[in-house]
Structures are given as C-alpha cells and as structure tokens.
Amino acid sequence: MAFRIKFPKTYQHNVADGKTYPAIFFFHGLGEPGPIYDNEFHLQHGGQFHAQKVDDGTFDGFMVYPQSQAGYLQSYFPVMKDLMDSLIKYVKVDNDRINIGGLSSGGQAVWDFAQQQQYAKMACSLEPISAAQYEDVNYFASHITLPILVSNGGQDVAPYGSVVTDIINSYKSLGGNITQCYFPEQGHGTWNAFWNDPRYWPFVNAQHKANPLVYFQHDKFCPNEVVDAKLGLQAGFYAYEWQKDNVTIPGATTNILMVNAYGTYKGRFKRTATSAWSVWSPTPAVISQNQGTVSPNITINGLASNVLPAPDGKTTTPLMVPANYAAYEWRRVSDNALVSSASTYNAPVGQYKIKVTEQFGCGSDFSGIYTVIAANGSGVPDAASNVSAIALSNNSIQVDWNDNPNPLFNETGFEVYRSTTAGTGYKLIAITGADILNFLDNGLSANTRYYYIVRPVNNNGAAAISSEVSVVTLFDTNPPTPPSNLLVVTTSRSSITLSWTASTDDVGVAKYEIYVDGVKRYVTSATTFTVYNLAALSTHSFVVRAVDATGNVSPPSNQISASAALSGLSYKYYEGSWDVLPNFANQTVLATGITQNVDITRRLRNDDFGFLWEGYIKIPATGTYTFETLSDDGSKLYIGDYSHTATALVNNDGLHGSVYA
C-alpha cells in the first residue's frame, strides 16, 4: 500500500523527549485512486488544508493518507493496522489518539473500519464525511464508545439526508456520542465546509481512547433523582481499572462502570497482558447535580410589530424561544391558561411567559413576562409628521420624518411600512430606534412607485399612522455584465447542454436569452440550459445575453460552437435485489445522466443497484473485433437497441466476483 505522511511540527526523530503525537488517518474518495507511481492524487481533497494546520500548530500530529490503486480502501485495512503499529513503535504516534476520517467512499470506509474490533481498538474517534448506510447500524454496539463527528449535505442523494438522520438516531439510541455537521444548501461535497466548521479541530484534538463514554450523555441528575449513570471504555482490552475522585474503585475491572454517586470518574486499560497501562482518562466523566434550566427570554420571530393591530393587518405577534429544548409551556398571564406547547406562538394582545424543559433536565422557572401591546393604550408617542421620500437611485429610497422634540411620552421606535399600492398592501420593512428620523430602503426595483407610512410606538401603544407618501425609483439604464465562460457540458445526437457563469447587475438579473445560430430561441432564469430537437451531427453556434428586471440587455457572452453528436454514454440507474439482470424496461429509473465511460461511481448506494448504459462505438475500419467485459457481479453487452429478450453479444451475468467474459 502506498501512502503519504506528514510529521508533526514539533517532532524530533530519535530524541528521547517523552512526547507522543496524535494522528489522523484519512481515507480518500472513489475518485482519487492512483498507481503507486502517482502518489499525490489522493491528497486532492484536504491535503494542503491539513498540512497548513500541522504547520501552524493547530494540529501537532501526524497526517497519514493511505492510497488505493482501485478506489476502495477496505482491502487495505490489515496493512493500515501494520502501518499504525510501526508508527507507534518507531516514530512516537500515540496509539490512544488515532482519529479515522474520510470522505465519500472513504467516509464509508471509516464506518467499515470500526466494524471489526481489532480496528475499532486502534481508533479514538471517527469523522465520516458524506457517507452512511443502513447496514452500518448492525455494528454500532461493538464500537459505541467511539465518539463520531459526521458531515452531510441537505442536497446530497448519496447518502440521502434521511439516511444520515436515521443513522445518527440509531447511534444515539444505543447511548453513543455522535455530532452532526449539517450543511442544508450543499450536496455531496461537504468536506471543505466540514473542515472549516469551528467544531472540527477542537473535536479532533480532544479525543483519547481512555476518555469514557457517558452513555446517552446523561451526566447531570436532578436533586430528587436517583443517580444512575453508565460509563464505558472500548470493549476487548485485556484489563480495566476505574477511579472515583482519584481513588481506585475496588472490583471495577470491566469496560463498563455503573455510577450511583456524584464525582469525577476516570478509567484506564491494558491492551495486552504485557503492555503498559494507558493513561488515566485525560477528560474524565464528571457526574454532578443539575442546577436547573434557566428559561430563555421570549423574542419576536422575525420582523414583526408587537403593538397590535398593526398597519399591515396583523393581529398577532410571532413569539419564539430557541428550538433546542425537550418541552415548552407557554402561559397567558391573565388567566394562567396554557396557550402553546411549541417553541413558537402567535400571540394576540396580552402578557405571556414560558417554561422550558431540557433533556434530562429538572424543569425551570418561568421566564420574564413578555407583553404584546394594545395599540390604543394611553401614554402613546406623538405621530410622525412631514414624512417625505426621495429616490436616491434605481434601487434605493430614503424616507424622512419629524417628531416632537419635547414629547410627553417618547417613542421606543418608528415602524416603517411599504407598499406598491396606494392605501393598502403594506408590509413592515423596518423598526428604527428612538429619535431616529430616517430610513434607507435598498434592494428595490427600478422605475417603480413605492408608498410609505410611519408609525411611532412605545410600551404603552402606538401613535396615529402618518400620512402616506410615494416616490418612483430612478429608471435603470445600466445593462448587466455579459455572461462569462459559456461552455458545452454534454451533447447527444439531438441535444446540446450549455452552462455559463452568472451575470451581475445593480438591480438584478431577471433572465438569460439564448441565441442559436444568431437567432434568439430560448429564455431561462438558470445558468444551464439544454437545447433539444437538433438534427443529428448538425453544428450550431451559441451566444447568451443577460436581461435585468428593467429590460436592459447585456453584451453577448463568448460564442461557442458544438455538434449534436453523442458524447460518452447515457445511463439509467436502478436499485433492486437481483441474482440475474432484470428486464430494465420494467424497473423504475432513479437517476439518469451521461458519463464518459462505464462508471459506477454515480450509484446512490454500494449494493443492490444496476446501470443501463447506451452509446455508440465509432469503427473507422473494417475488420473482426472482439468484445469482453469484466464485472462483479453480472453484466451483459448488446449490439443494437436494448431488449431483455435479445441475445447478448457478451453474457457475463450472475452472482460472482470480478470475472472476464
């Protein structure tokens, strides 16, 4: 097995300084294999980033990158363990601080590494990125003491977000400590965001094999609750010892310790009969009394008025507290009625308080009282006067007003409302501070009339609404920048797919016009487009222009030409459990696309899937040609249109390993 290794910044070879160092073993994805003579490609994702973190001292440890020659890394696990043993023996790697991380198929290898106890015993933590399978759940009990930091994207389909959620819940249901770094707007490639997440390096640096798992993270107990905590170290070592408050506990000699008293608990273990004891837990488990939950302050959810009714027609105010509690109890103060059990409540005029409960919490006192104010109260501020609006540009308007410089009851703020229709349709757009007499409204449409009203409010109620003013934004004469980097993504015998880099505009790009052979043919708001119904092998030129909301048209993009000819292989992807190839015409297509060659990396899971590839072979000379396939499991090769009942030119079907036919 080829591998790359970076040594710690402070490492000194053959110097007996008593130091040992943590390590990260990182498993690359399916797209980064390479021969042993090209021992760089697997560093493509994260190699430079992690090297910089070693150099700047963020991680004073080893970075180890095993390399697969075929893509998958599972077959290298025995060699990896040998490498770990050598690094421990010869270059001061701490065998209790080896973190295992990986992305995509390498992330799946992280899960698989922990499935066998001999490898789980070498790891102090797991960091799988964009990888999860239901099959992993079967092995969780054997490595439940390993802390896990998992990453996934909300747009990913391999794995789907629901799969990752189920995996996390399964690990938690066994008491395991697993944390999710979730990136809702990202797809499969979450690794850069994950490595830049502020939780990543503190997590990696904190791990040690002798740190005990507190099952279910239940380390605090209420005053009237029986203390009943469960602690655990990795199973399978030769011997174990536990301490409470630095005193060794007689008879506590297994990897599990049941705790029934407050205190600080440490554990240690011997890997073999002849090995040294590990250190006592660097991060012990502290079992203590829960001091109770402090209920959070009630706030407004979003931009809304708490003085009702509001000029936008609202008669309730959306109230909220953070959504990370186990239970919620909203009460109306006037009659102590329960009004909501959620983290939010749309409240009419009145006074409200809330009590929250945390998981394993002891309950809490009620929060401070929040008042949704009646607009018609007494002691309200004076109305705003001399309201005016002036257009500063094609997308901004400044609103100004006056107030009483010597009020009897001053405002706490001014509510500014906007509409595009006189006298109706108003929306709250801002609440200024007290004595602030202007507001700059940005992000507007060009050449559009906007209407404004202003309402001063305080804790007693609201003043009368101001008179309505209106103004038209300036006309936009600036065109968008031209689309750039227009290129061909894929072609077929009847279509060509284009993509380009988005234009910019001071008002905003509304659409793109696509010109085919000099004639405007299509309009889209996206930055990719497929031109269909082209004659086979015909050649066409393409140009794209951007249009803003006012109708200004950009200069043209770069011009490109392309032919309607098949490029690569079109594929259809299926899932099912088969012993022989099914009739794909009767199966449900789960994904389609084009690849440059036969490529199973587009699969959405690692087992029980199938592909149907279709394409053309250009044969420039007459002659006799031989075709063969290598597949694991079955495959068939057809010449001509696909038909399940046709006779395959190459029949390599059935359940088998890698076989030529």
Image: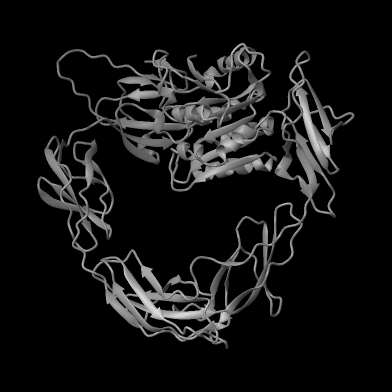
Q: Is residue 14 above or below residue 5?
A: above
| Along the viewing direction, whichever of 147 and 505 lies nearer the viewer | 505
The image quadrant where one finds the C terminus is top left
- Residue 590 sits in quarter: top left
Position of 487 with respect to 424 (left or right) is: left
Position of 468 with respect to 436 (left or right) is: left
- Residue 557 sits in quarter: top left
| Along the viewing direction, whichever of 251 and 174 lies nearer the viewer | 251
Residue 646 drawn at (x, y percent): 30, 27
Q: Is residue 372 above or below residue 481?
A: below
Q: How many marks?
A: 0
Residue 414 drawn at (x, y percent): 46, 76
Position of 544 with respect to 158 (left or right) is: left
Q: Is residue 88 above or below residue 579?
A: above
| Along the viewing direction, whichever of 231 and 111 lies nearer the viewer | 231
Residue drawn at x 36%, y 28% as measured from the top left: 599
Q: Is residue 29 visible?
A: no
Residue drawn at x 57%, y 87% as measured from the top left: 379
Looking at this rendering, what residue extends furthest in the front direction? Answer: 406
- Display coloring: one colour
Residue 163 drawn at (x, y percent): 53, 42
Residue drawn at x 54%, y 20% as measured from the top left: 7
Residue 208 drawn at (x, y percent): 67, 29
Looking at this rendering, what residue extends furthest in the left direction? Answer: 518
Q: Is residue 250 visible?
A: yes
| Along the viewing direction, whichever of 214 and 235 lies nearer the viewer | 214
Q: Is residue 347 above or below residue 495?
A: below
- Residue 291 sits in quarter: bottom right
